[in-house]
Amino acid sequence: MARRELPEINAGSMADIAFLLLIFFLVTTTMDVDSGLMRKLPPMEDEKPDKPPEVRERNVFVVLINKRNDLLVEGRPMVITELKEATKEFITNPRNKKNLSEKTSKVVPFFNKVDVSKGVVSLQNDRGTSYEKYVEVQNELMAAYNELRNDIAKSKFSRFYDECNEDQQNAIRKIYPLSISEAEPKNYGGK
Amino acid sequence: MSKFRKKGKGRTPGISTASLPDIVFMLLFFFMVSTTMREVELKVKVSMPEATEVKKIEKKSLVSYIYIGPPTSGYQAKYGTEPRIQLNDRMSGLRDIDQYITSEREQRDENEIPYMTTSLKVDRTVQMGIITDIKQELRKSDALKINYSSRKKVDL
């Protein structure tokens, strides 16, 4: 029996082939993570309810954006950098001002009795508002809520809201419910 | 001559490249696993706005995308420069959204439908009018979970 030695295959070009594949995948794929602001739309109601839910005027925080991307908050112009603080003050109403949101006492797990704001943020925009501004405003409103939630999570559970477990997050969400309502589309002043 | 120089001929031995393929393959597999294929060809220009409070979308398989923006230069002759809606690979109108959502739903499991999200990938220059219309369409077809796609702003 003649046992012939098999000639070894030259693996020198293997690296080239692998590089080629690697470059192909690098070019054809995207690595961007999908991120964004999560929001929920209100369900469409076929018939108008008999009367709109009663919300007193002091409990509504009106944010308007016109087609020139200017902000009007509670009847006065505002720059976007002030919006977060104004929203926070409206919700918490630390000095119990008459024109800011009312509070009710509520029993929430972990917290016993706490004051929960009845405030609702109402956001209205024009058809001509730029999307960038709209997202910016949404972001500031979210930031206000997130900061409040983080504050209370830190003082109660000494960790961030995102790091709390499900029950704790639910409790915090009860204290600071994300209530941003968007008006049914309207046209302000035409084009 | 001195005793010490006898062994080598003064040349450094070549580095073995035998493990190079292994290293490259490792990289290759990393990229294959961590990336996703580009699914649609974008016909509209989408440069997303920035935000700080962004959340990552967790289940990508449950997301349907709506792209809104001005057509890219190659398509401007055909579609003009006004913002358009793109669903999958087609330029679409407002009326197609309902059908698109329905077809997306049919591809998913029934118990996954409540977790489906619609991601709006909108160019930052777009005006809100078209988006308001789309939101109304989505409400009509009961796709209430939406996501305003935006990039995480890096604080400097």
Image (cartoon, rainbow, N blue to C red):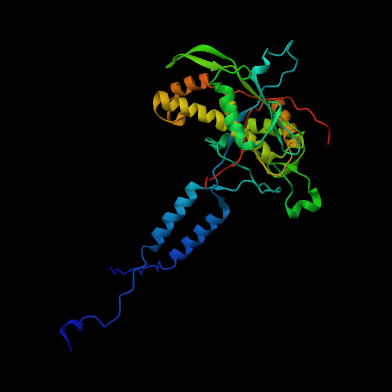
Q: In the visual, does B91 lie left or right of B52?
A: right
Image position, residue A157 (x, y; %): 40, 25
- Please state, as top left, top right, bottom left or bottom right, where the N terminus of chain B lies in the image: bottom left
| B15, above or below A128, in the image | below
| B29, above or below B135, in the image | below
| B154, above or below A126, in the image | below
Q: In the visual, does B41 lie left or right of B36?
A: right
Quadrant hosting residue A85:
top right
| A141, above or below B50, in the image | above
Query: Can residue B119 be seen here?
Result: no
* Residue at the image position 51 percent from the left and 15 percent from the top: A115
- Nearer to us in this view, B60 or B135: B135
* Residue at the image position 75 percent from the left and 34 percent from the top: A66
Image position, residue B134 (x, y; %): 72, 33
* Residue at the image position 47 percent from the left and 24 percent from the top: A169
Image position, residue A56 (x, y; %): 67, 14
- Nearer to us in this view, A114 or B72: A114
